[in-house]
Image (cartoon, helix red, strand yellow):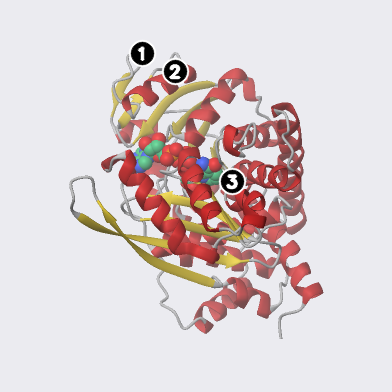
Amino acid sequence: MGSKNTAAAGQSTRQIIDELEDYYDKDNLYFQTISSVLEAADLLNIPHNVKLMLSQPKNEIMLHCPIQMDDGSWQLFKGYRVQHNNVLGPYKGGIRYHHEVKLDEVKTLALLMTMKCALARLPYGGAKGALKIDPRAVSPRELERVTRRMTAALGNNIGPDYDIPAPDVGTNAQTMAWMADTYINFAESSRKVMAQGVVTGKPLEFGGSAGREKATGQGVVFVLETLLPGIGLELARQSYSLIGYGNVGSWTARLLQARGAQLKAVLDHTGAIINQAGIDAEALAVHVRQTGGVRGYPHAREISEADFYATPVDLFIPAALEQMVDLEHARTMQCKVLVEAANAPTTPDAEHHLLERGVEVLPAILCNAGGVTVSYFEWKQNRLSETWDESVVDARLKTVMCRAAAHVLATAEKLDCNLRLASYAAALERISTVYRLRGVFP
Ligand code: NAD
């Protein structure tokens, strides 16, 4: 799992970025991510036109939703839907509710969805959406109104054959139920059944899939089971720390606990906690559900954010927001493997530093592909009017995740590059082949 970064590759990447006639900001998340994707493209000699097309999203939709709040006042909420690429199939990607979300972040996440779906061999392209709102700061009725208004405003820009949103940070099965219901209300009578497939991650009782809620965490665990033995590590003997105890973090923890791994420290938006003897993942999940965060969990001690990052563990698992592992934190981290359960959690200089120190970095488009994979299973069940048992979902998810992990490993060996570049290269190979077969209209 070495690292290759040729001067020629850098030059070609620079050329594409220059052709975009866009800003050239090395601290910009989208620029950083596309640079890495283009670096991988150069390892495979991907044609120039494919690199150019992937360098910017196909569509960037921006909308504003006027909402009357419960107290009678009015607010305008900004929304985004970025559709990066659909050469492999309909656009697919989550909808995030966060008060600090920015367009470049949504573009980055949409690009990563294109790569992730291609790597997992799903018949989807990549997209991402966001609403600039703090879901904890509004009432459930206000949240429902803004969700329905946003869905109506998106109109035909989403659809079960065109662009299929799903939950992400700050959204959940309830959000998806409101979106699906709104979309179905606008659909023609003959298309109402199929219209349910407009979003995935729906509640089980309303077209959802068994195993979807835990799917991203389950995928992380399947990746670890596949890759850790090759690094000489046995999952059951690993200690780990987690950033984020939401959907992805808490499910990863509960599933790792069942496999014998030990949770030592957690950081979320409310604070950081540690227990060197181990934190019970189930009990912590109950505490977070009741109080909204890890702070105040009675069977652990509060620590500072700096102490959290410096806690020695075998696996360090970020499962919250982007760029939380920066160089300053990376310098203090003491782990063997960085497991990117969140999207884009590591800055390029932090990654470089960790790789230099011999830390394995398992890339996000592989680690967290379980969510979109079970979303695909949900979409497929909706189209076939079928309901699969959880055991069927889990078995099919395991097949997809293990195949993707093995593919990344083989690509890293073939191209003599790190796992992030290998994961992008594996995805790009598929996208480029389809472009070659389809051609570019007109
Ligand atoms: P979530 O809203 O359920 O949880 C987010 C977590 O992040 C919470 O625990 C919150 O406390 C924590 N957090 C927020 N701000 C923080 C801060 N400043 N410091 C520390 N912690 C902070 O979101 P999620 O669905 O679990 O998503 C987490 C990550 O996983 C995101 O990067 C998301 O894009 C990615 N992801 C999610 C899915 C999915 O199926 N939900 C699928 C693939 C990838």
| Residue 118: x %, y % from top left | 69, 57
Q: Residue furthest right?
A: 437
Q: Nearer the viewer, residue 212 or 282?
A: 212
Q: Residue at x 51, y 47 (%)?
A: 181
| Residue picked out by circle 3 | 200
Q: Amino acid at mark 3?
A: Thr
> Where is residue 235 drawn, in percent x and y?
63, 25
Q: What secondary structure is marked by label 2?
A: loop
- The 10 Å Cα crowd at callout 1, few under 14, some 14 to 19, many 20 or more, is few
In x, y percent, where is residue 164?
A: 59, 55
Asked if the residue at tag 3 contacts the one at tag 1, i.e. Cβ–Cβ closer than 8 Å, the answer is no
Residue type beneath disc 2: Ile
Residue under label 1: 299
Q: Residues within 10 Å of mark 2 (few under 14, many from 20)?
A: many
Look at the image and tell me whether residue 54 can be seen: yes
Judge whether 318 appears above or below 64 on screen. Answer: above
Considering the numbered disc 1 on the image, is that residue within a helix, a strand or a loop?
loop
C-alpha distance separating marks 2 and 1: 7 Å
Please state which amino acid type lies under the numbered disc 1: His
Instruction: Please tell me which residue is depicted at 58% across the width and 24% down the height of the picture.
Output: 256
Residue drawn where x is 59% and y is 46% of the image: 200
Determine the quadrant in which ligand 1 lies: top left
Pointer 2 residue: 279
The image position of residue 68, as x and y in percent, is 25, 53
N-terminal-most mark, 2 or 1: 2
- Quadrant that contains the C terminus: bottom right
The structure residue drawn at horizontal position 77% and vertical position 49%, both measured from the top left corner, is: 410
For the residue with label 1, is its CB less than 8 Å from the closest atom of ligand 1? no
Mark 2 touching mark 1, by CB under 8 A? yes
Which mark lies nearer to you, 2 or 3?
3
Q: Which is in the foreground here, disc 1 or disc 3?
A: 3
